[in-house]
Image (cartoon, helix red, strand yellow):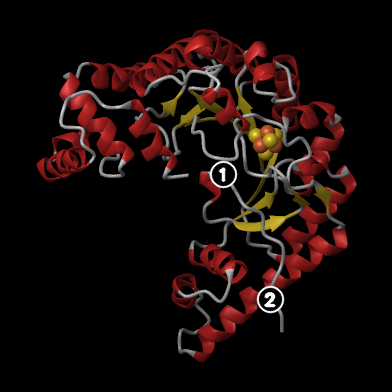
Amino acid sequence: MAYSYELGPIRPPSEAYSLLIRVTINCPWNRCQFCRTYKGQKFQLRSVAEIKQDIKTAKLIQDKIKELSWESGYGGRVKEIAGMVVNNPPDEVFRNVALWLYAGSESVFLQDADSLIMRTDELAEVISFLRGTFPDIKRITSYARSKTAARKKLDELIQLREAGLSRVHIGLESGYDPLLQYMDKGVTAAQHIKGGRNIVESGISLSEYVILGLGGKEMWREHAIQTARVLNEIGPDFIRVRTLTVSSGMPLGGEIENGNFIRATDEEILEEERLLIEHLECHSNYVSDHITNLLQEIEGKLPQDKGEMLASIDRFQALSPEERANFRIGRRFGIYNHLDDLYESHRRQAVEQVKHRLGQGSNQVDDQTIYTLMEGFI
Ligand code: SF4
């Protein structure tokens, strides 16, 4: 029996343990300068029948793992068998289902970049079928573009919520129109607000993603202030930040080579983040769940945790130049997770060794080295 089906390339960090069901293929826009995920790939809608077949196959894999659990003496408990499959999966589909089962099979993420582009009736049918097939799932989420969400009627979004769509993740990236245009995001700040408000008003939970550093050295200030303004108007449940990385295949790489876009450094990006947080007045959870962020501890509930979040930036900025250099390398090398880790002598020594190996004996950290290390994570 074949256990294979469509899997897309990405999901948000918060959906690491979700069952992945691909409802559309690639991105219908596919022009953003800072994104390489679907470049060269054509967007395709999928039929409801095809998607249902994938969901049925995921169910078959779930049943197979349960069966193995009985046969292996685990009495139908799936965690142990799922853990073994995750470590030695026959393929990526099996691995994804096993990981989902291992983590308690609570959530499903609908891939790829803009599921709301499906006809509402069809997407609602898929979501209802998922809920019927896996009655214990607690959350179904998906990516969407603001422009698509802005075009949907409120009634349609309510229909999707009633079918079982719990949360939408939108790549806001910035709220500054000249920057959105420069990056060819294909959406204006006003459309971001309209799309975001539509989701919020429908009762579907909303995550908005912001890219720190997207304004580079030239537009960072407006990027921070206008992004905060747009987020204040939307009032999403979650604001999630990640830091700009530039890897091969991204059109932005050419702009950097030509000198048209000058990247901001870690320390400049922290100033930008300070300005963003200072201007945020919405009631949202601010989440820094991406490996690319220098200070992952800048998290909290707005507005009450704003002071504490800004204090983390103060704390970094109060470090000596040597300590800041050490932390940046340690963070980008995966040795540190938080500022407190700087005070664990074994970690600090490990970073000093790395610095030595990189030929960074001086206190000056070469920004290009830092960018290269960061991009190694992506
Ligand atoms: S809309 Fe999203 S997936 Fe599509 S190109 Fe832009 S960033 Fe990439």
Of the four image quadrants, the one with ligand 1 is: top right
Please, what is the three-letter code of the amino acid marked with disc 1? Pro
309 sits to left or right of 40: left
| Residue 136 location (% of width, % of height) | 63, 62
Q: Residue 237, can we see it?
A: no
Q: Which is nearer the eye, 55 or 161?
A: 55
The residue wearing badge 1 is 12
The residue furthest front is: 258
Q: Tag 1's secondary structure?
A: loop
**Residue named by callout 2:** 3
* Label 2 with label 1: CB-CB less than 8 Å: no
Q: Which residue is drawn at 45% across and 89% down?
A: 73
Q: In this view, does 127 lie above or below 367?
A: below
**Measured along the vertical axis of the image, is residue 120 above or below residue 318?**
below
Q: Name the spot of residue 262 as percent of width and height, x first.
A: 48, 18
Give the distance between the C-alpha atoms of the residues marked 2 and 1, in whole angstroms.
24 Å
Q: Is 139 above or below relative to 352?
A: below
Give the left or right position of residue 332, taking residue 160 as reference. Answer: left
Mark 2 lies on a secondary structure that is: loop
What residue appears at the point 39 percent right and 14 percent down from the top-left corner?
Answer: 271
What amino acid is labelled 2 in the image?
A: Tyr
Foreground residue among 63 and 294: 294
Q: Which of marks 2 and 1 is nearer the N terminus?
A: 2
Left or right: where 158 falls relative to 321: right
